[in-house]
Image (spheres, rainbow, N blue to C red):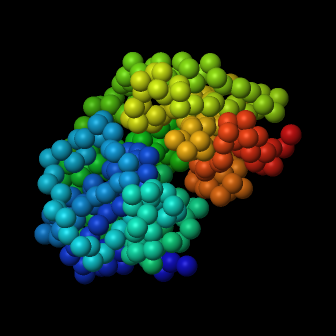
């Protein structure tokens, strides 16, 4: 089990080290990237060597998070910090070499597996970026415009632009603080939620045509197959934001999106309303996450994958 830390203890720990490697999770989203680059910028402001790494390519739409920043050159880290990563397996293949070496994890997932030596965990927060903001302030670093943009991005993306049930008054106050510090909320929200490529629209069409309903229409399952991705011309950046689609349908309590990987297995994203706990569904299959949004991996082929996830859904919400 990890040693649990407070925000203040985490800040003191980071003050004591000089070469920090920051790890984000695979299939990167706005929260893991916003958290990672905000922390990296703060550490640079303190004169420390720090860089952010991810197993997967970072989508171009997140380029503004690091565009004005020079990451420290390659160095042998004396301290490794993972952000917004509940399980070491989520670091992905390229970063798997660090799985047993993570010094600190900063996270907001209640399903965190305590893989790091030390853990700052605040599950009641909507985004890891909120915790990062508190840590930066505890470090004595003034949050500048670029850090604010990173933090705002993490908050906005993990709350669905403040639509999800995890949005609290503190969430909104922290986002407002970042706006006051220079985060361009209009541009960030438009880039994150409104702009879609033509390839993404085509992939949505194919995926929606593929959607099936189960359990008296309480569960909708959408499968995104490799050939659909190829046909649409969609890239990795086009995948983000697909998971909520099945849950948006009236009467659906559990929305499931399965995405085929190169090895034939499936990445599963579960979204629920107030009738079901997404993390409980995914926990049955070795995954985890939040009450309304969670994920796991299941083995293919697609027919078997659907039966596997459907069995977990039935176990939680009944036949």
Asked if residue 74 is positioned above or below residue 264 in the image, the reply reads: below
Asked if residue 134 is positioned above or below residue 77 in the image, the reply reads: above
Regarding residue 159, the answer to whether it shows in the image is: yes
Q: How many marks?
A: 0
> Is 169 on the left or on the right of 195, as rendered?
right
> Is 200 on the left or on the right of 226, as rendered?
left
Image coordinates of residue 235 in percent, x first then y, are 39, 32
Q: Quadrant of the C terminus?
A: top right
Residue that protrudes farthest toward the front in the picture: 263
Regarding residue 15, the answer to whether it shows in the image is: no
Q: Residue at x 42, y 41 (%)?
A: 157
Image quarter for residue 247?
top right
Q: Quadrant of the N terminus?
A: bottom right
Image coordinates of residue 190 in percent, x first then y, are 34, 28
Asked if residue 272 is positioned above or below residue 96 in the image, the reply reads: above
Image coordinates of residue 136 in percent, x first then y, are 28, 64
Asked if residue 307 is positioned above or below residue 207 in the image, the reply reads: below
Image coordinates of residue 13 in percent, x first then y, are 31, 79
Instruction: Please tell me which residue lies in front, 163 or 226.
Output: 226
Q: Residue at x 57, y 31 (%)?
A: 225
Q: Residue at x 49, y 64 (%)?
A: 88
Image quarter for residue 267?
top right
Instruction: Please tell me which residue lies in front, 170 or 117.
Output: 117
Q: Residue at x 15, y 62 (%)?
A: 73
> Is 14 on the left or on the right of 83, as rendered?
left
């Amino acid at each position: 089990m990890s040693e649990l830390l407070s925000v203040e203890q985490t800040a003191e720990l980071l003050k004591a080290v000089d070469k920090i490697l920051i790890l984000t999770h695979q299939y990167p989203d706005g929260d893991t990237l916003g958290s990672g680059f905000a922390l990296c910028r703060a550490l640079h402001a303190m004169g420390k060597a720090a860089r952010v790494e991810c197993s997967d390519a970072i989508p171009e739409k997140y380029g503004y998070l690091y565009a004005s920043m020079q990451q420290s050159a390659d160095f042998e880290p004396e301290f490794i910090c993972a952000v917004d990563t509940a399980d070491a397996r989520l670091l992905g293949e390229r970063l798997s070499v660090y799985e047993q070496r993570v010094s600190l994890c900063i996270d907001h997932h209640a399903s965190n597996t305590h893989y790091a030596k030390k853990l700052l965990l605040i599950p009641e927060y909507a985004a890891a970026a909120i915790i990062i903001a508190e840590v930066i302030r505890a470090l004595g670093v003034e949050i500048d415009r670029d850090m604010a943009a990173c933090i705002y991005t993490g908050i906005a993306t993990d709350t669905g632009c403040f639509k999800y049930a995890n949005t609290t008054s503190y969430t909104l106050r922290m986002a407002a603080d970042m706006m006051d510090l220079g985060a361009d909320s209009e541009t960030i929200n438009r880039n994150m939620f409104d702009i879609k490529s033509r390839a993404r629209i085509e992939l949505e069409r194919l995926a929606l045509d593929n959607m099936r309903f189960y359990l008296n229409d309480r569960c909708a399952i959408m499968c995104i197959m490799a050939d659909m991705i190829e046909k649409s011309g969609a890239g990795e950046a086009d995948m983000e934001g697909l998971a909520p689609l099945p849950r948006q349908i009236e009467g659906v309590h559990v929305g499931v999106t399965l995405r085929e990987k190169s090895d034939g297995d499936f990445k599963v994203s579960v979204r629920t309303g107030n009738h079901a706990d997404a993390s409980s569904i995914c926990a049955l299959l070795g995954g985890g996450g939040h009450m309304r949004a969670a994920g796991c991996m299941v083995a293919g082929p697609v027919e078997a994958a659907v039966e596997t996830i459907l069995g977990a859904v039935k176990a939680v919400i009944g036949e």
